[in-house]
Image (spheres, grey):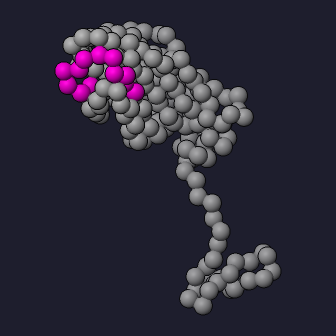
């Protein structure tokens, strides 16, 4: 069995206490933070979408076309308060929809490392009122009130070729509700996938 001897004072060895505790200085960062360091963390945001009906509209669609796994660290959904709601909005997350009926790029595709020029090059689309998706399975559902922001920290892995869609039913009886959807995430280091 190997032992670690107290090397206090020489600058190259660790200190070991009388209780046999190894003293170290460590910096801990999440996988997301490490990805941001190398320019692989992204904020994808639809920008404002105006919803006017009390039925679900698919507001965001993302497909990973890159070689490494994309990890969604959080999903944010913001809702304005210019409409009359009959009840809270229903937000659904769909796993692997086969298609959507829109192809307008989301407004924001931002690298979270301001010194990096890398971009998310998968598909990132924003829907409109009445947009739909085909196929896929609803895997998560949330409720959110008008004039609030939902910030769901539910990590999801999107391998190459996989996709995700987010639908919002604002449950409004009149007026227009401005909404946005953001996917905050990062690409995994291919050596760690």
At x 60%, y 27%, the residue is 110
Q: Nearer the viewer, residue 65 or 164?
A: 164
> How many numbered circles does the render carry?
0
Residue ranking furthest to the left: 86
Counting from the top left corner in percent of width and height, residue 74 is at: 44, 37
At x 62%, y 41%, the residue is 36
Residue ranking furthest to the right: 10
Verify whether residue 66 appears in magenta. no
At x 66%, y 43%, the residue is 37
In the picture, measured across the screen, residue 63 lies left or right of residue 58, that is: right
Considering the image in quadrants, where does the N terminus appear? bottom right
| Residue 59 versus residue 11 in the image, above or below | above
At x 62%, y 86%, the residue is 17
| Residue 40 versus residue 52 in the image, above or below | below
Q: Nearer the viewer, residue 170 or 11?
A: 170
* Residue 178 appears in view: yes
* Residue 57 appears in view: no
Counting from the top left corner in percent of width and height, residue 46 is at: 48, 20
Give the residues drawn in magenta, as a range.
78-90
Counting from the top left corner in percent of width and height, residue 93 is at: 33, 29
Verify whether residue 88 appears in magenta. yes
Considering the image in quadrants, where does the C terminus appear? top right
| Residue 31 versus residue 140 in the image, above or below | below
């Amino acid at each position: 069995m190997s032992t670690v001897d107290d090397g206090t004072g020489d600058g190259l060895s660790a200190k070991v206490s009388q209780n046999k505790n190894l003293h170290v200085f460590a910096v801990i960062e999440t996988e997301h933070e490490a990805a941001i360091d190398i320019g692989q963390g992204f904020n994808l945001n639809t920008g404002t979408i105006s919803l006017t009906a009390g039925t679900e509209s698919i507001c965001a669609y993302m497909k990973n076309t890159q070689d490494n796994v994309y990890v969604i660290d959080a999903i944010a959904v913001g809702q304005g308060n210019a409409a009359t709601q009959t009840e809270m909005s229903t937000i659904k997350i769909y796993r692997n929809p086969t298609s959507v009926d829109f192809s307008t790029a989301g407004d924001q595709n931002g690298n979270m490392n301001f010194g990096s020029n890398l971009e998310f090059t998968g598909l990132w689309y924003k829907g409109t009122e009445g947009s739909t998706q085909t196929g896929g399975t609803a895997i998560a559902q949330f409720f959110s009130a008008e004039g609030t922001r939902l910030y769901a920290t539910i990590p999801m892995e999107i391998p190459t070729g996989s996709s995700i869609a987010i639908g919002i039913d604002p449950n409004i009886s009149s007026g227009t509700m401005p909404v946005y959807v953001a996917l905050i995430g990062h690409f995994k280091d291919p050596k760690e996938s």
